[in-house]
Amino acid sequence: MSSPKPEIKSFIFGMIGVTATLFLILFLIYADETGAALSALASMSSMLLTGSTEFSSLGGGFSANIFVSVVAMAISLVAGIILGVGLIAKNIFIRLIFKFVMNFLRNSPWLVLLYAMLYLIPYEVSLFGYVFLLSPVVKAIIGLSLPISANVAEVFRGGVESVTDGQWEASRSLGYSHSQILREIILPQALPLMLPSIMTVYAALFIGTSLIVVTGTDDIISIARVLIASGADQYATAIYLFILFVFFAFAFPIAMATRWIERHLRSVSA
């Protein structure tokens, strides 16, 4: 197994470099008021990260961004695999239909999809005598799951097609059906190759949660807007620099892990 040392070094230098750069920007903007800005950020950090005043609960702020990204990714993995299977179906008409759906979702602006979910999905649904409330979080999850499912489907298709045709032909000569070949021969080889791309898709999804504020979700940007409107407008720049930092601090390790996995896979296949 290849050593993760290069990625660890990049991670350390990246975290130090970005932290120092953001602090320098903060100092250049606030100068003598930098200490006051940092103190204000410290007092608001619990609201920004958890949506509560003393880290007493989760569900809002940055924790909402993480929750939405994890649930949306779980849904997208299932939907994306189903869509991906359609992309490699033997029937050409099925392939064309699934390809159209994939291209439509993959090339649709995320912000437009979120607005569409906001207005297309009702706030409550009656089913079998029960009323189900569809919160802004649900709409955000659905809105982000649509384009991510298409990206997962494309990763799935690419992973399957990366396995040589000779293995398909050899398996058919042994009497395996198309589904058996896919399930027992191709996927065990293709899934590890898909992992770096799946992680990259998740990183993009997580960064995309910065858009869910338009659905009314109490995410970190929504909380920031409330705090700024409630009297912290002089620290608005500091608040958004803090948001930039926490997004980076969450996504950057994923990027480094993805790079290490890619390098490990290359060394194994070499």
Image (tube, grey):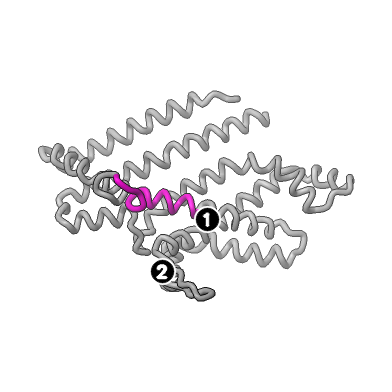
Of marks 1 and 2, which one's residue comes earlier in the chain? 2
Neighbour tally class for label 2: few under 14, some 14-19, many 20 plus, Cα within 10 Å: many
> Where 128 falls versus 146 (above or below)?
below
Residue 17 belongs to magenta span = no
Q: Identity of the amino acid at label 2? A: Leu
Residue, x 29% and y 44% (percent of image)?
A: 55
Under circle 1, the secondary element is helix
Residue, x 43% and y 72% (percent of image)?
A: 124
Q: Identity of the amino acid at label 1? A: Ile
- Where residue 119 sits, quadrant-wise, is bottom left
Residue, x 83% and y 52% (percent of image)?
A: 177
Q: Mark 2 points at which residue?
A: 118
Q: Main secondary structure of the magenta part?
A: helix
- The N terminus sits in image quarter: top right
Q: Where's residue 85, x and y in %?
A: 68, 56
For the residues labelled 1 and 2, the Cα–Cα distance comes to: 18 Å
Residue 59 belongs to magenta span = yes
Q: From the viewer's perspective, is 24 left or right of 251?
A: left
Under circle 2, the secondary element is helix
- The C terminus sits in image quarter: top right
- Magenta stretch: give its range: 56-72
Badge 1 vs badge 2, beta-carbon distance below 8 Å: no
Q: From the viewer's perspective, is 95 left or right of 143?
A: right
Residue, x 20% and y 43% (percent of image)?
A: 43
Q: From the viewer's perspective, is 157 left or right of 29?
A: right
Q: Where's residue 141, x and y in %?
A: 46, 59
> Where 117 falls versus 20 (above or below)?
below
Q: Name the residue under label 1.
A: 148
Q: Where's residue 250, x and y in %?
A: 40, 41
Neighbour tally class for label 1: few under 14, some 14-19, many 20 plus, Cα within 10 Å: many
> Where 11 falls versus 137 (above or below)?
above
